[in-house]
Image: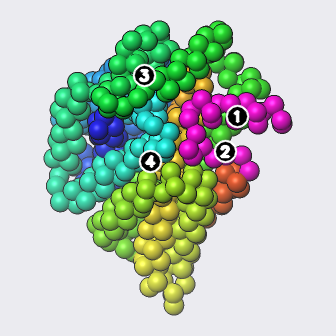
Amino acid sequence: MFDIFAWHHCFYSSTHVGFSSPAQSVIMNDLGLSIAEYSLFSSILTIGAMFGAILSGKIADAIGRKYTMWFSELFCTAGYLVLLTSESALWLDIGRISTGFGVGILSYVVPVYIAEITPKNHRGAFTILNQVMICCGHSTMLVIGNFVSWRMLALIGSIPCLLQLLGLFFIPESPRWLAKVNRWKECESSLQRLRGANADISGEAIDIRVYTETLKQFSDCKLTDLFNRKYAHAMIVGLGLMAFQQAGGVNTIAYYASSIFESAGCSGATGTMAMASVQLPMTILGSLLVDKSGRIPLLMVSAAGSCFGWLLVGLSFLLQQDLQLWKASPILALIGALIFVGSFSLGMGGIPWVIMSEVFPIHIKGLAGSLVTVVNWLGSWLISYSFNFLVQWITSEGTFFMYSIIAGLTLIFVKKLVPETKGRTLEEIQASLVLFTSKN
C-alpha cells in the first residue's frame, strides 16, 4: 500500500510533461508565442529537471527518500501556480522550470524508494508501476487538454499536490537508507511496517545489516570514483539505457503529438486520444510481465516495436510527396505512432528506471543515480528542443527515420550489455556485477 503514494508522485510529475502537447496551439495564440519561444517553453522543463537531478542523489542521501519527495513538492506546486497566472513567455518559462526542478528530483528518488522497500519477487512490477502512473498523468492531460483551456489544464494539474502532501504522512522511510545512516531500530520498524505486523523480517534485516556493514569499509564516493573499473558495468548499463531511452525520440510524442498528427494530415485530437488509449494498457501489461518474463525480453520487444513504429511514421511523411499515395499518410502516421507508444510503454518507458534503481550499490547510488538521471533529462531536453529544428533541417521523414535507427541500436545494446535482474535481491545483483567485471 505504501507504493501507492510513490506512484502518485509519478502521476503528478507526468502531468507536467503532458501539459504542453494538447495546449500548444492555444498557448501560442493566446500569448503570441513564436515557434522558438514555444520550443523553449516546452523543453525548459528538462533544464529544471537536470538541475533537480544533479542535486537529487545528495538530497536523498542527506535527508532521506521520504523528505526528499516532500521537498520536491514545493517546487512542483509553485510552478503550477505560476503557469496558472502567466501572462508572458517569461513567466511561462519560470513556472515550467520550477516544475521541472521538482520532477527532476522525483524521477530519481521515487524509483529508488520503491526498489528499496519492495520484496525482490515484486520489485520490478512495483517499480515499473511508476510508468503506469506516468501514463495515467500523461494520458489524462492529453485527453482533458482537448476540452478545457490551458489555464484550466494547469489548475487541474495542481490538484494532485494536496493528495501527495497528505499521502507523505502515511509512508515509512526506506529501511535501507535508515540502515545506511545507522538508525537500526527505525530500519527494523520500517521493514516490519512494510512487510506486515506478523511477517518474519529477521532474514531480510540480517541481509541489509551485513551488506550495509560491508559498505562502511568504503570511503565517501566522489564523482571520479564512479569511473572506477569495479563500477564500469553498472555505469555503462545505467547511462546507456537512459541515453537510448531519450535518444529514441519519445519526447517528440510527449511534447508535440498534436502538431505531428496535424502535419501528417490527421486530427490532433483523434491522434492524442488514440495514444492515450494505447499507452496505459501497454504499460500495465509491462508491469504484469516484468517479474515473469524478465527485464531483457521486454526491453528487446519494446526497442524492436519502437523501431518499426518510427519507421512507419517516417514513411507516412515520405508518402506525402507522392500524389497517388498521399491519402495513406494520415492513417500510416497514426498506426506508426500507436505502435511506437505501445512498444515504448511496454518496456523502454519504465524498465530503465527499474534497472537504474537496482544496479548501483547503495554507497554510490546517490551520486551515480544523480548522474544517470541528469543524462536522462539532458537527452530529454536535446530531443524536445531540437525536434522542430530537425524537421526543418533534415525533413520530417528524415527525423523519424533517425529515431528508428536509434531504436534499432538500442536493441543491440540491451542484448550485449544489460544484465537480467529479475528475482534477485539488490545485494545479489551487486555480487553478480562484481563477478562480471572481474571476468572481463
Say which element carries label 2. Answer: loop
Q: Which residue is mark 1?
A: 433
Viewport quadrant of the N terminus: top left
* Residue kind at label 2, given as amino acid type: Pro
Q: Bin the neighbour count of mark 4 within 10 Å (Cα to Cα): few under 14, some 14-19, many 20 and up.
A: many
- Alpha carbon of mark 1 to alpha carbon of mark 4: how far? 22 Å
Question: Taking 51 as reference, is 326 above or below it?
Answer: below
Residues at discs 3 and 2 in contact (Cβ within 8 Å): no
Q: CA distance from mark 3 to mark 1?
A: 23 Å
Q: Are marks 2 and 1 in contact (CB under 8 Å)?
A: yes
Q: Can you say which quadrant of the picture contains the C terminus?
A: top right
Kindly identify the amino acid type of the residue bearing the numbered disc 4: Ala
Asked if the residue under mark 1 is in contact with the one under mark 3, i.e. CB atoms within 8 Å, the reply is: no
At x 47%, y 9%, the residue is 182
| Sequence-first tag of 4 and 3 | 4
Q: Are marks 4 and 2 in contact (CB under 8 Å)?
A: no
Q: Which residue is mark 2?
A: 419
